[in-house]
Amino acid sequence: MPHRMAYVANASDGKAADPDLPECPFCRITPDPATSYDDALVVRRGVSAYATLNLYPYNPGHLMVLPYRHVADYTDLDDAETAEIAQLTKEALTTIRKVSQPHAFNVGLNLGSASGGSLSAHLHQHVVPRWSGDANYLMVIAGTKMLPQLLGDTRDLLVDAWSDSAS
């Protein structure tokens, strides 16, 4: 996906577009929205982890659950981060099911750059809703995915539904 290169190159070259911002795009998101950057797609904030929509989703509702702390490997998480990532993942599944009624999910981690992780220095777990037949001719032949909804609209639906399920 060539349009991702600016994002990936910026994240992996050790330089932020703004020298006052953290180098890692995931570290620009903090527990406090008032001190956070680039967090327009954050769906849910926790104490040690958060859920955010993927800027380059494979499917509508594709989000990531990750710690605020910059760690690369699952074994580097402390117990509180591990527990909160698990809890946010469960809540994400419940919320996406309520909003989109997917047929299935892919949930997983890409640990290390050889695994396909483009931003492998900051651990992030993908939650990807799947529907039967969601890899259609456009995806297979042209390598292009059509998303029927803008990311901001998807975020708003998930935030509203997540708030309803958390109460």
Image: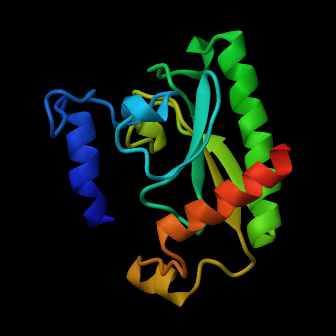
Above or below — where is 38 with respect to 86?
below
Above or below — where is 108 with respect to 60?
above
Residue 161 spot, x, y in % from top left: 75, 59
Write down the quadrant of residue 164 in the picture.
bottom right
Q: Is residue 12 left or right of residue 159?
A: left
Q: Residue at x 50, y 80 (%)?
A: 140
Figure colour scheme: rainbow
Q: Residue at x 72, y 26 (%)?
A: 84
Write down the quadrant of residue 112 in the picture.
top left
Above or below — where is 143 with respect to 106?
below
Asked if residue 70 shows in the view, the reply is yes
Q: Residue at x 51, y 77 (%)?
A: 147
| Along the line of sight, the residue nearer the viewer: 21 or 86 | 21
Q: Residue at x 19, y 34 (%)?
A: 16
Screen quadrant of the C terminus: top right
Q: Is residue 160 left or right of residue 112?
A: right
Asked if residue 120 shows in the view, the reply is no
Residue 59 spot, x, y in % from top left: 58, 68
Residue 21 spot, x, y in % from top left: 23, 30
